Image: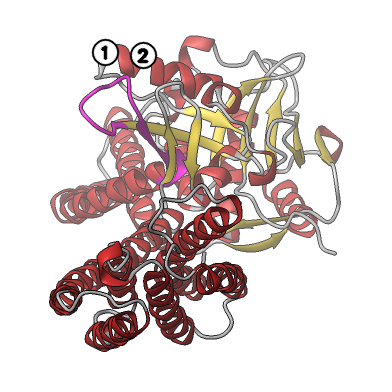
Amino acid sequence: MSAHQDDTAVISRADEQTWNPLRVFNFYRLTLAASFVLSAATGTSQAFIGEEMPLLFRPTAVLYLVFAIISLIAYFRRKPDFEIQVYAQVLVDIVAISLIMHASGGVASGLGTLLVVAIAAGGILMAGRMANFFAAVATVSVLIQQFFALVQIDGPPADFTKAGLLGATFFATAMLSLVLSTRIREGEKLAAEQSVDLANLAQLNEHIIQHMQSGVIAVDSDNSIRLTNSSARRMLDWDRDEAPKTLNVLSKDLSEQLIDWRKLKVVDPRSIRTGAGEVIPRFNALGLRLTGAVLVFLDDASALNEQAHQIRLASLGRLTGGIAHEIRNPLGAISHAAQLLDEAPDLGKQDRRLLEIIHNHSARVNEIIENILQLSRGSNTIPEPLELKPWLDEFMADFLFSSGMQQERLGFEIERTDMIVRFNPTQLNQIITNLCQNAIRHGTPEGEEPRFDIRAGFSDRDNRPYLEVCDYGKGIPEDEAQQVFDPFYSTHSQGTGLGLYIAREMCASNRARLDYRRGDTVGGCFRITFAETNTATE
């Protein structure tokens, strides 16, 4: 709801608060006038009502009823203005009741108390502004009718004293209505201000919730969904127009975690896979009881992994500075000394073998340092749109030339030729080169020529683009499938154990994912699943 709509609603409520008391006053008048007409028509009234002058009482009662009906119609039409209606109705009430009181014997009839109601109503409706005026008009009206009563029906002079006391009552009522109306208006003003503040606060809360990066779902004690924000709908991949009513329908895993949390209060959050990725839930009770309403916060697992990745890269960046200073300089001295020693003419065959070992392991240590330094520099990765088919054509041509591999031994499949992914092309080249070299080194059966496939397509699970390298070797045992991504883990005596770790970290810095899976028939596949993007040119 917009701020303009909120203000309009507040104004509308204030307008209703102004007119509603007038409706009550109109129905009171209608009831009073109808009782007068019924009394005149049936003759069942008390003896003093209209007894002295029935010819005045009957038409006055009928006209008063007609006016009451007209006033009620004017109220519903809201025309004329509020103040004009109040002025007219109170003044007509004073005149009509004064005439009926006169027809009933004057002040002694006791009908003057009905004027107190009219004055009080007029004073409250007009916020006390015209209360004294209405009291003065009523007092004059009572005195005039008392004068005519004295002349026409020979009323007692003592009734003038009663008329004076009744006039004093009118003014006292006017003063009281002034005080009451002031308090009522102050209360209405305070209520209106609080209503505006509450509306603004509710709108602010709605704005904050809807713009939170974390998903928010509010559920009641029955796990019925009461509120969601746009982030939650995006993470859980569901349309607001077709939103499920209960958490169990939305996500069975999420509902089960909430049930466990209600029982134990402390539950380690488990990631939940959805159509849009993975989310990690957090629960917070609204109130003291865990069985009551609960706020469910959803965090994007990929964003958390990216944050952890950046922290790891920052730590590695600090580590590489120490490595470069503490290891590289002594390593350079060792390599230089070995080169000088290699130039000695009187070295034997065994000594030269030892020098070869020094050269080889110095090169290996230097490679480790270069890989770690390269990983730390990957923190500044900027993914960019990349047309996959032309890039792969160029990559395969370069790789076949540099490796000397026969072209027919390299299989290639792509689901669509217009695939576009977001990735740093230099880092993608390094990753695919590493995967292809691993396929040659570890995925080639003994005694056979190297053979592997490069495939690109879209995942059946989430329709995200992928690129994978599949070999025809023995594959990796299940208990070692995840360990291959750990740093310094290697099954090859000449390997550093950093290639796949660096490849996975580079994928993470490009918001992609590198996984291993068993091949469809033989071997294994390393798959890069790219971030969501426009996967085809239009």
Q: Nearer the viewer, residue 323 or 183?
A: 183
| Helix, strand or loop status at disc 1 | helix
Q: Nearer the viewer, residue 314 or 104?
A: 104
Taking 164 as reference, is 243 left or right?
A: right
Q: Find out whether residue 31 is within the magenta segment.
A: no
Q: Is residue 156 above or below residue 431?
A: below
Q: Residue at x 24, y 46 (%)?
A: 338
> Residue 264: which disc?
1
Do the numbered discs 1 and 2 sit on residues whose CB atoms are within 8 Å?
Answer: yes
Question: Which three-letter amino acid code belongs to the residue tagged 1?
Answer: Leu
> Residue 260: which disc?
2
Q: Give the quarter of the image for residue 361.
A: top left
> Residue 54: which disc?
none
Q: Give the quarter of the image for residue 305.
A: top left
User: Where residue 326 sits in the image (x, y, percent)?
Assistant: 13, 50
Q: Is residue 152 above or below residue 177?
A: below
- Residue 300 seen anywhere in this rendered image of the structure: no
Taking 244 as reference, is 177 left or right?
A: left
